[in-house]
């Protein structure tokens, strides 16, 4: 589109120049004068192409004044020889005035350029109606030059803006993909690691229980593969209820006492996925950065909002992750919760209890068949 617009404005300018050339060559002046007129016309055409170029209006003021002055001289001096046959070139000048000067100055000068053709026709002894026609033609040519140049600039800017939007969309999709992989793989690999350590301890004494844990590791690995495929295809929905169940199993394998309270109704898929991802990241951080012995999970829906709270008692207030790739999980969670219109808060108490709370609108009325249950897992160090 920008190339087509540029080609259009060049074609129009060449068309006006061709008409002026025909008028000049049809006069009865000497051959030298006619050749000189055509050469001057080519100079004016070059200046007009410069003025009509994209970004020409952003040129320094001194350069614009210099080129406009040169165009004005080349426009009006040949009038002494060619009279009204040279009037087409006034349209170029009128368009350049509108393109390069501020509106408060450009429009009066534009009008003066048109009236000058009326005065020229009268001085040339032509009827008034011919002068009006010549002035109108010059003004109309100026508007055509001005309008097509501005249209070309707008098309170019629109094309550049569309390209920038496309680049931003690609960058946003890359960020989403990286964020989803971070949330998925961090959680899944932590779960597989814990389950594998538990299997290693159970094999000598409880082989049957170890086999059961192996089945769970295989299930987690299979689900992780399915989740990665869904991320690659741009579609992935998670369930908060299912994630709470998986979390109880994984933290139980780590010997962490878990108490979960769930009172949920119907949630929209976006809200359900955002809260499930929040729980995943909270549990992943718990396993990576703490030595917790207790964890509390509360997922309660009241009125039009859902609140998820995750607490654990194993955070060292002086802890600092020295790894240069420690992750940006909480930043990702803030972005996810904001996308669904919610808010996220985190707080580390003086007693070492870390609390993560997310509250989002449910977007659906709560159902009456809500579920409330509390589950306790064996204390840390138990084989079960």
Image: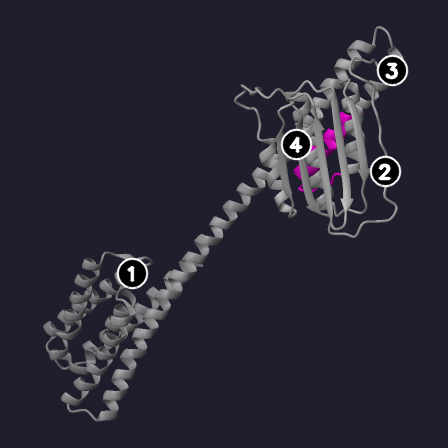
Q: How far separated are the C-alphas under marks 4 and 1? A: 50 Å
The tag earlier along the polypeptide, 1 or 2, is 1
Foreground disc of the pair 1, 2: 2
Res 130 → quadrant: bottom left
Residue 166 visible in this rendered orientation of the protein: yes
Name the residue that disc number 4 marks: 183
Which is nearer the N-term, disc 2 or disc 4?
Answer: 4
Label of residue 209 in the image: 3
Q: Which residue is mark 2?
A: 372
Q: Is residue 259 left or right of residue 351?
A: right
Give the structural element (helix, strand or loop) at label 1.
helix
Q: Quadrant of the C terminus?
A: top right
- Residue 236 falls inside the magenta stretch: yes
Q: How packed is label 3: few (under 14 Cα within 10 Å), some, or many (20 or more)?
A: some
Q: How is the image coloured?
A: one colour
Q: Are marks 2 and 4 in contact (CB under 8 Å)?
A: no
Where does the magenta region start and end? Answer: 218-238
């Amino acid at each position: 589109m920008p190339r087509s617009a540029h080609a259009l404005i060049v074609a129009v300018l060449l068309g006006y120049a061709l008409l002026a050339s025909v008028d000049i060559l049809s006069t009865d002046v000497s051959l030298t004068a006619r050749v000189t007129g055509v050469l001057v016309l080519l100079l004016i055409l070059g200046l007009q192409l410069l003025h009509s170029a994209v970004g020409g209006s952003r040129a320094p003021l001194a350069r614009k004044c210099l080129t406009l002055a040169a165009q004005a001289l080349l426009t009006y001096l040949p009038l002494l020889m060619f009279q009204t046959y040279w009037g087409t070139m006034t349209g170029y000048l009128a368009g350049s005035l509108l393109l390069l000067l501020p509106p408060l100055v450009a429009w009066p000068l534009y009008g003066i350029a048109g009236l000058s053709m009326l005065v020229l026709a009268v001085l040339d002894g032509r009827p008034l109606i011919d002068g009006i026609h010549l002035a109108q033609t010059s003004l109309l040519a100026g508007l055509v030059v001005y309008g097509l140049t501005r249209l070309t600039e707008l098309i170019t800017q629109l094309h550049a803006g569309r390209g920038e939007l496309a680049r931003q969309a690609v960058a946003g999709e890359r960020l989403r993909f990286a964020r989803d992989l971070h949330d998925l793989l961090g959680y899944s690999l932590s779960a597989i690691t814990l389950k594998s350590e538990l299997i290693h301890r159970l094999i000598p004494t409880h082989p049957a229980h170890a086999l059961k844990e192996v089945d769970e590791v295989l299930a987690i690995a299979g689900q992780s593969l399915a989740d990665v495929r869904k991320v690659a295809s741009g579609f992935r929905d998670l369930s908060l209820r299912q994630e709470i169940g998986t979390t109880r199993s994984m933290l139980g394998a780590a010997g962490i006492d878990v108490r979960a309270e769930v009172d949920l109704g119907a949630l929209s898929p976006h809200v359900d996925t955002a809260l499930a991802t929040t729980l995943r990241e909270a549990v992943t951080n718990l396993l990576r950065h703490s030595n917790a012995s207790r964890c509390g999970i509360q997922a309660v829906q009241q009125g039009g909002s859902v609140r998820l709270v995750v607490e654990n008692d194993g955070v060292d207030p002086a802890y600092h992750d020295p790894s240069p790739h420690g992750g940006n999980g909480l930043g990702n969670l803030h972005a996810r919760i904001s996308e669904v219109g919610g808010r996220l808060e985190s707080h580390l108490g003086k007693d070492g209890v870390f609390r993560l709370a997310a509250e989002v609108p449910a977007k659906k009325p709560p159902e009456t068949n809500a579920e409330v249950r509390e589950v306790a897992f064996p204390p840390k160090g138990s084989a079960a």
